[in-house]
Image (tube, rainbow, N blue to C red):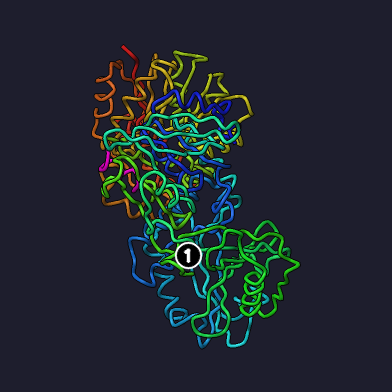
């Protein structure tokens, strides 16, 4: 794993020689996302895992990233929005590892599983889900009739079948690879990750966390690591660690056994199936396609350190076969039993806990700077990590920087806005303006900040520039690899507001379609200027154009373009003045288009767009009123 995260040779003594802001203990999804969020906010972060990262409950999950459909049943709109937002985040940042998953629930009369499965209730729930989520990565839900349900799921039990409810969630194709990508990202933001390193003792000075003793499980050596805060994200062992570091806290984790079965058979449908046996209140089972096999889950039982016994596995198979009469799943077809421990609602319960627990030990008389975190869902692990950092900020002297904006430089949906002949025309106009402004420095070292859409790198590489791209996520490299020969550019996944380069590291720094989406755009300008030795080139929309009508036309823009976002529109001279504040002058600008891009997209004819813009340029309309502006300013 250390080679995967590209932090060099595993070196616990080197980690012990540093002083950390935060040590996150536990290498499941909760610890990893906390490490990522902490590193993105500028905290010196160390991740320690006693075994292998993502090797326990995370690896054995059902792989579904659930949205908020279930929370509409209880009108829990906060959890609905949180789940939808986090599902969207995974889809946008890891499109090669996470994809939309169609889910089909057969509907019966009388309903199986309770009144909320009546068609009228599901029709309303699906409509509200689509309305409130605003999630264009996910197709809309709908009700299917009997024929359409049977076509999608030929083995459906047709006794009393009314039809089906079809919606979309998301599926993780490989939890282990997702863990690796999250670790890579965290480490490129400055975190360090150590596996086979066990936190065995907390050091406290004056009631405040001062360090943690780490045992190297390969050599047996112990090292004291100095830190200002410790987050106990031990998953099933979180309560044990809380007792070791401070005192027992039963509310953190009351163990519950959860397990899924991987069956050696073809999935009965390309969709995930939500099925229940006949009878009111029967449990819902999910049958999920998994690399040509069938994953079924999730079953819950009283806690066991050895996993489910044969009786529990047999009971699971009986229930599955009752829910899908033609399935006839047998014990010999079980390839793997994937099990782990989850927090239960109460001691001795087989009902999973519904909400995460974030325990601030300092507020209970324990060490300040120690928190224990017990999550409940993979989907919302990152949201829990953000809340954990907020607790640490109020309960200790740890002060994370504000959350960096999610600028979505890896969004496939946003990249598609520049596909097709009209999109190619936009990119050609943009490239021509940039190459003209770069003309004084042929072959210069160029940093493209936020270039994950591969808009500028191809023409720059073709002209012989030495190109480095800084993107917000590793998936940016994958898009660039599709557009450019391997080895023709350098790439780094990074927090774009805290670039990991020394001052004046590049001749010219470019940043396109970024400032307009940042509330903290002035901080971004300062960072661009810091690493630029000769010049900075940025683009932005200003109000000396049709953008003056932005507010009243944005609804139409969204309807035409689909995947679009609100943006900042700058006053004339506002961006040049900010660059001048950092010692840059001699402004040169090129305005790209007279008519707004949305008009060209709505017409959809690249030839007509070229003709109209050629006339506008000849009449000097583009020079005076065009947008976006491409601005170059040079270091004085």
Residue of label 1: 140
Q: Residue at x 57, y 36 (%)?
A: 217
Given residues 217 and 159, the one toward you in this image is: 217
122 left or right of 334?
A: left
Q: Residue at x 64, y 78 (%)?
A: 156
Q: Is residue 318 above or below residue 586?
A: below
Q: Quadrant of residue 548?
A: top left
Question: Residue 375: image x %, image y %?
Answer: 43, 54
Given residues 585 and 445, the one toward you in this image is: 445
Q: How many other residues sit within 10 Å of disc 1, few (<14), some (14-19) or many (≥20)?
A: some
Question: Residue 493: image x %, image y %?
Answer: 49, 33
Q: Quadrant of the N terminus?
A: top right
291 left or right of 227?
A: right
Question: Residue 209: image x %, image y %?
Answer: 33, 36
Count of marks, rendered view: 1
330 left or right of 136?
A: right
Q: Quadrant of the C terminus?
A: top left
Q: Which residues are magenta?
A: 387-396
Q: Is residue 281 above or below residue 506?
A: below
Given residues 326 and 466, the one toward you in this image is: 326
Q: Residue at x 44, y 13 (%)?
A: 440
Question: Residue 362: image x %, image y %?
Answer: 28, 45
445 left or right of 329?
A: left
**395 inside magenta stretch:** yes
Q: Quadrant of residue 68?
A: bottom left
Dominant secondary structure of the residues highlighted in magenta in the image: helix
Given residues 235 and 601, the one toward you in this image is: 235
Q: Is residue 502 visible?
A: yes
Q: Secondary structure at mark 1?
A: loop
Q: Is residue 602 visible?
A: no
């Amino acid at each position: 794993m250390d080679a995967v995260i590209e932090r060099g040779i595993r070196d616990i003594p080197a980690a012990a020689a540093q002083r950390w802001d935060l040590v996150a203990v536990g290498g499941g999804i909760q610890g990893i996302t906390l490490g990522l969020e902490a590193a993105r906010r500028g905290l010196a972060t160390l991740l320690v895992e006693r075994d292998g990262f993502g090797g326990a409950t995370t690896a054995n999950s059902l792989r579904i990233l659930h949205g908020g459909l279930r929370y509409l049943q209880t009108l829990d709109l906060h959890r609905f929005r949180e789940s939808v937002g986090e599902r969207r985040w995974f889809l946008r940042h890891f499109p090669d590892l996470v994809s939309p998953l169609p889910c089909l629930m057969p509907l019966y009369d009388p309903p199986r599983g309770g009144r909320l499965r009546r068609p009228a209730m599901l029709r309303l729930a699906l409509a509200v889900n689509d309305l409130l989520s605003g999630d264009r990565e996910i197709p809309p839900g709908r009700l299917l009739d009997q024929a359409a349900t049977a076509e999608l799921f030929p083995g459906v039990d047709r006794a009393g079948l009314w039809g089906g409810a079809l919606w979309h969630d998301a599926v993780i194709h490989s939890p282990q690879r997702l863990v690796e990508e999250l670790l890579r990202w965290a480490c490129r933001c400055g975190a360090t990750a150590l596996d086979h390193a066990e936190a065995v003792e907390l050091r406290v000075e004056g009631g405040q966390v001062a360090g943690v003793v780490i045992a190297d499980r390969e050599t047996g050596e112990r090292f004291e690591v100095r830190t200002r805060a410790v987050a106990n994200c031990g998953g099933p062992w979180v309560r044990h660690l809380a007792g070791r570091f401070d005192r027992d806290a039963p509310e953190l984790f009351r163990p519950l056994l959860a397990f899924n079965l991987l069956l050696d058979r073809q999935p009965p449908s390309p969709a995930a199936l939500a099925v229940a046996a006949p009878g009111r209140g029967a449990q819902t089972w999910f049958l999920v396609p998994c690399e040509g096999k069938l994953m079924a889950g999730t079953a819950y039982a009283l806690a066991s350190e050895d996993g489910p016994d044969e009786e529990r596995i047999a009971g699971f198979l009986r229930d599955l076969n009752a829910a899908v009469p033609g399935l006839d799943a047998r014990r010999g077809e079980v390839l793997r039993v994937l099990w782990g421990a989850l927090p239960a609602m109460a001691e001795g319960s087989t009902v999973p806990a519904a909400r995460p627990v974030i325990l601030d030990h300092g507020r209970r008389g324990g060490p300040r700077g120690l928190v224990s975190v017990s999550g409940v869902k993979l989907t919302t692990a990152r949201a829990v990590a953000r809340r954990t950092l907020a607790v640490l900020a109020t309960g200790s002297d740890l002060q994370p920087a504000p959350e960096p904006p999610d600028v979505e430089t890896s969004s496939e949906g946003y990249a598609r806005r520049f596909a097709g002949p009209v999109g190619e025309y936009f990119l050609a106009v943009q490239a021509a303006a940039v190459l003209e402004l770069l003309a004084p420095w042929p072959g210069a070292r160029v940093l493209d900040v936020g270039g994950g859409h591969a808009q500028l790198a191809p023409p720059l590489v073709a002209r012989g520039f030495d190109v480095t791209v800084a993107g917000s996520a590793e998936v940016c490299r994958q898009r660039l690899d599709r557009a450019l020969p391997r080895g023709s550019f350098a790439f780094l996944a990074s927090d774009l507001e805290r670039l990991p380069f020394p001052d004046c590291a590049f001749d010219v720094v470019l940043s396109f379609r970024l400032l307009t989406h940042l509330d903290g755009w002035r901080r971004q300008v300062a960072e661009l200027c810091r690493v630029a030795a000769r010049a900075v080139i940025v683009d932005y929309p200003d109000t000396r154009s049709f953008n003056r009508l932005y507010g009243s036309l944005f609804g139409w823009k969204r309807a035409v373009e689909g995947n679009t976002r609100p943006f900042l529109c700058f006053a004339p001279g506002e961006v040049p003045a900010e660059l001048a504040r950092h010692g840059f002058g001699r402004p040169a600008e090129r305005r790209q288009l007279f008519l707004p891009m949305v008009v060209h997209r709505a017409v959809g004819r690249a030839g007509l767009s070229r003709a109209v813009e050629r006339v506008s340029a000849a009449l000097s309309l583009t020079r005076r009123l065009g947008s976006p502006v491409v601005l170059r300013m040079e270091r004085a």
